[in-house]
Every structure is written in structure tokens, then in C-alpha cells.
Image (cartoon, grey):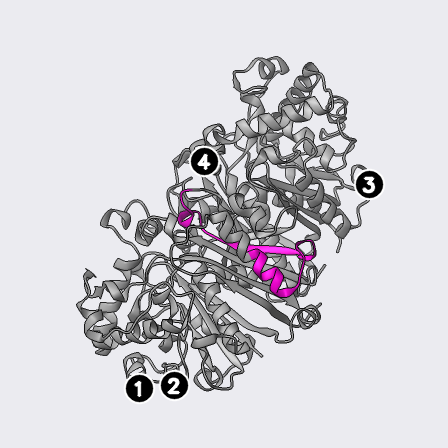
Amino acid sequence: MPKKVGIAAVAQNAGVESKDNFYDQSYKITKEILDKAGLKREELETIISAASDIFHGGISCANSYYWETTGAFLKPGSRQDGESLFAFFYGVMRILSGDYDTALVIALCKGSENPENDACTLMYADPFYQRMIGMNETMAAAMQMRIYMERYGIAEEQCAKVVVKNLANALGNPYAHRKGRFTVDDVLGSDRIIDPLTQMQIAPKSEGMVALLLASEEKAKKLTSKPVWFRGFGNSIDHYYIGDRDLLDSPLKTAAARAYKMAGISRPRKEIDIAEITEPYAFQELIWCEDLGFCGPGEGGKMIDSGATQKTGDIPVNPSGGVLANNPYVSRGLQRVVEATLQLRGEAGERQVDKKMKTALAHGTHGFAGQCHAVAILGV
Amino acid sequence: MGNPVAIIGIGQTEHGKRMDVAYPELVREAVVRVYEDAGLEPDDIEGIVSGTMPSMMEGVALTHFYLADAMASKGKTILKTETCGSTGMSLAHTAYYWVSSGIADLVMAVGHEKMNEGDSQATMTTVGDPFYQRYFISGAPGVFSMQSQMWSVRYGLAEEKIRDAAAFISLTHHDSAFDNPYAHIKKRLTAEEIKTARIITYPVRLWDVCPNSDGACAVIFASQKMVKKLGIKKAAWVKGVGFSGEEQFFGDSDKAVWQSAVLAVRQAYSQAGIKNPLKELDVAEVYNPFTFQEMMFYECFGFCELGEAPDMVLRGSFTRNGDLPCDPSGGTLCTNPIGATGLIRTAEAALQVMGKAGDHQIPGAKLALSHAMGGIDQFNGIMIVGSEL
């Protein structure tokens, strides 16, 4: 059985609304990644996709719709729902089992054909209690932000700085959906959606076909001269009812601890060179940095003030612009892995972080106020 | 295949119209039972994989959130596998690869559905693309009836013969369900009643079709190390897995010889070293929501030659006393909580090789096949389990 799993190639499309239909988009990305790896469809062994019926343009059983466009015709495969990092992990398992030497992991979400994200996230709410009061991800996030500011004295301005940083980073990312140079005042002056969240602090709704080719150690070395290696994974989930949870004690701590243990990381701030994390709401980047151990509890505000998470800082966070710049809901976790891979390979173009890098972290979250988190560690 | 993997615990609900419980309570019932069966606590488990049919079925999306407490999953590593009707089998596969990869030693798979809280046929109609297929595919029976017509025409099967064979299957499965404490539809039928029941979609009649069931199934998979450590005597070892998928537009390919079924079973047989399934397998839990389709599976799985299934059925080859007993649990025909159904097939196969199937035990069963299918005639998955490593 192989000891190591490598990433042999990556591909993604742009987040803006595309005139290409779903089939064309997913076919093109599949073709692109196979071409990059120099692999024929016939040689590809298994396909794990990620998609969610609720984010799938009103078509149920998402994999039933797109199966053949992902190169999976008459091939063994499976699908993960909701979080594309699950599919990444499942792909890794399939390689480690020794049954397969290559696995295509592909996340599919055509945001432009979906209703607003929160029309979908409302359907996470149970139909009896939470849905009646309109609970959705943005409402849950607003409550989480309020508690965060009150418990640790975090200022709205500090949260807004995340938007300023990430949308400026996105200027270097040709795939980003939303980008630009903005000020803290621009961010705080945008429409108030659910207090204290303003429009610019909330991620958009984007397109995203994101693909990654996994291979066993030997095969990866044959397919690419610059393999990036899987080093660790962890995920965790919290209680369901939001009132049963401490929204500042997130399962991300457990997820990160698991990933760090598998990767042999004991000092994340020092050992991780760059992090791509899922921050659908600006303040969440600050909390997630705390939970990932990049700083202490309540120190997320100080951390953004210090510039440590800037592209030039000691631990750049979201040099791609993150999810605030590009939010293909289900695909965003895998997109973090793709961005982290590009950084480690030195192929991130204008968004490339200018330092020698060995280890990168990719993070995904979904659910009310981060009910579920997943963390992947990559290395060269 | 990777590290050896065994099934060491099974929990099922009493499937049926369960208006006495809410959806999370239903799931809880299966989860409590699997822990009792395996003699384990939720704390012992490293990972959980759950799955169901699409969110439209019950009106709640991404149910791993809603059911987190029912599955006692707080703080655990979680995955969410869904592949349409084959979800239950894909859950078993996920748990298998998780343990087989060496990443975990104990993983629980949970499949669930509460179909009586939604409209299953309306939901399944939305599986078809919105431009072409949705207008003329209403729910599941339409597609599968057309498939059985294609099959009967291909092999020139006399209408009367396949009708008789389908009635035979329906009658024996509904009888078998009386011996399965968890089965949904338990009804003594006559061949005449079955053959004259109201038409659903020609040639499929009422007793040729599975019901809408509420139900959940939980199965615990363990590594060899863990089986030893826990001192488990009765385990069902995974001998082979296979899966294959086809395209969405079902007019584009041959469904009379169902390629994904043929390829999935070939993959599993090759891993399990099975050359003559009819002889080597002791029991099969075939995913049979439609009587006519069950016969096609017998052919695709090599239990008989192409076009021969109706004759073999009428000879009694697949009854509980036959050469290869199929669906002694009553199968999907009598119980179909879709997201759980494929996993129930694996669970029933495991119970058989562990000798724990109770009144529907096939004496001496050592090697069993389980199967699920899904999509618009698109997906087939197989897991073969055996009593020995």
C-alpha cells in the first residue's frame, strides 16, 4: 500500500457568471486537468465529486446529472455532499487503500443558476423551530460576530480589514469573482444586511468547477515534476441547535488538532507557511485564525492589525482573496486546496507569496456559524 | 485490496410508516441499536459517514447538520456520501475505504430516509434534467418499466412468462418479509392477485413495486486489528467492492444488458476471486425495487445466462431453498427507505454470513453479495462479504 498521496495537477474556472452551461464547464475543467497531467480518460481510475442538491440549480441527485462530464462514464466513483474537502479526503483514502493509483477529485457548483445562498442555507434549518424564525447562515454568522465582538472587544473596523486585505489580494487572482481596492469605510458603509454584518463582509455567490488529481507516490512522480504531498486531514462537527452551542468554541479546534497530529505539526504559526481558509463572513477569518492556533483566543483582531496575515506577513492568509472574493459554495473548500497547491508549486502568478514555502493549510467550513469544519495540510 | 475490513455491528429500525417518531428519532433508533449490537459506545468510533436521498425528499438539506445529535457525531470526523438510489451502498464503500486505507479502525455508516414526510415520486422526477427528460419521466416506475420492456424485447421473452416470473418473485419476497422483523410490507398474496393488481406503469403493477418506507440502518466497520482487540467472534469480512456509473440521458445507452451493473460486479468478483457466482455465492441481497428489474440483475451478475432469468426464477433457483437464495429478507420490494436501502442490503448480507439473520437465515451461508442501484438507470454498486477473512 502506498504511504504517500500526491497532488499531480489542479484546475479551476473563474467565479464570475459564465455563459457556458454546467456540462460545458465541468467537461472543460475535467479535460484541462487530464491534459495537464498527460492522462487519458481511459487511464483515470476513480472519480470522487463534490456537489450538493440544494446548490444544484433545482436538480436532485447532482451526480446523476453530471456523471459523464467528469470523465466518470463506466468508472467507479462516489460523491460527497456539502463540503468538497470531504471529497478530497475520500480521494486520499481510495489511493491509500491501494485499490487505485489515480483519483480525480472534482467539485461542481454553478452559482449563477442557484438562488441566493441563504435561500439554500435556510433549508439547513429544521422545519419546526429554526426555519420559522428565518435562521440561515448569515443570521447565524451575525449572532456569532456580535458575541465575538462583545466577548473579546473586537472592533467592527478590525473585521472590515479582512475584506480590505482579501479583495486587494484578489486583484492578483484571475479566477476571483469580486476584487478591488477598498477602505474600511467602504466596507462598513455598504448596506447593513443583518446587523452587524454589512454587504461587503458577506461572500458573494460564484461559479466554481474545481478539480484536483490525486495519485499514489510513484504515479505522482511520473505525472509531475512538482508533486505536492498530502500530509494531514481533520474534520469535526458540532451540535445542531445553535442555542446548544458556544459559537466561539468551534469544532475547528478539534479538526485542526487532528490534521496537525497526522502531519506532525506542533507549532502551527511557525510551521505553516501559508493558509487558505474559508471565511464566508469577514470576522470569521479572525476567529478561524485563533482556532487554527495562529494566535491566542480573542487575538484575531490584533493579528490582522499586525499585518501578519498580509501577503508580506509571516503567515499569509488567503493570498487568493479567499471566499470573500470567490464563493462557489460547495467547491470553495477544494478551491482552497488548489490555491495552496499553486502557492507551494510557485505557480500562483501575481498572487504568489514571495518566500520559500514547505507547508500549506487549506480549510473549509459549512453550516450555521461553522457547525462543521475541515482542515487539510499539504507539503512539498 | 487494502487492509482487511470487517462489519462488526448492525442496527436497523423497524421500517415502515413511522409517524410515531420524528426524523432524528428514527435515526437515533438505528444508531442506539448498532452500538448495542457491537458492544461499543459512541466514544469508541473515530468517524461517521451518513447519507440519504436529495434534500427535497424530507425538505431538509445537508442532513448531517440536522441529524448530528441523533448520530452522536459531535466532535467526530464526518463525511456525507450521496449517489442517489445507490447512496446506501456508497456509504458502505466509504466506510470500507476509510478503514481499508489505514486512517481509521472503527467507522460507522448511517443511511436514513423518512419518505412518508415528503413526496418521493415528485422528488425523483427532479432527478431528470429540466429540459428534456423531466417532462416525460415521472418518478421511478417510468424509467424502470421502460428498461424492462427493452430487456424483454431484446431476448424475445414472452409477455406471459415474464409476468408469471415477476409474480413468483413478488409472492416469495412478500412471504419472506414475514420472517424479517424489520421489513415494512408483510402481506400474503396469491399469484392471481399480483397479476391482476392495478397498473402503475405498464407492465409494472402494484405488487411489482417497492413501498415508501421510513427507516434507518447503521453499520460499524472495523479493521482487523480492532476485531482482534475487541475479541469479536462473528464478523463479516469485506471480500470485494465494485461500482460503476453511466450517463444521465438514458436513451443514449443499452439498458437491456446494463453495463454499469456488469462492470460493478466484475470489479467485486475479481477482488473476491469469484468465478462462478451461482455456485460460489451462498446468498444475494439484490436491490430489487421492481420485480422485472430483479431478473435483469440476475443476468448481469452472472447468476444465469442473458435472457434466461425468467425460466430460472420459475424453476425456483433463487428462492430460499434454491441454488442461490436472493433477498431472503424480502428485499427492497418490501422495504425501501431509499437512503438506507443499499446499506440494508449490505447489513442483511453481513447478518447472513455471521449466522445472525434469525428466521430468514440461509443455513450455512458463508459468502454473500449485496447490491444497490440508482440514478436514471445509471449507478450500480456491489459489496461482497464473507464469514472468513
Query: If the image is split into quadrants, where does the N terminus of chain A sit?
Result: bottom right
Label 2 resides on the chain identified as A
Label 4 resides on the chain identified as B
Q: Secondary structure at mark 3?
A: loop
Q: Is residue B42 left or right of residue B97?
A: left
Marks 1, 4: nearer the viewer? 4
Specify the amino acid type for callout 4.
Phe
Looking at the rendering, the stretch of residues picked out in magenta corresponds to A30-58
Question: How far across and down, in percent of the image, does residue B327 sit?
Answer: 66, 34
Label 1 resides on the chain identified as A
The residue beneath circle 1 is A306
Label 1–label 2 contact, CB within 8 A? yes
Specify the amino acid type for callout 2.
Gly
Label 1–label 3 contact, CB within 8 A? no
The residue beneath circle 4 is B131
Q: Secondary structure at mark 2?
A: loop
Marks 2, 4: nearer the viewer? 4
The residue beneath circle 2 is A313
How much space separates mark 1 and mark 2, taking CA atoms? 9 Å
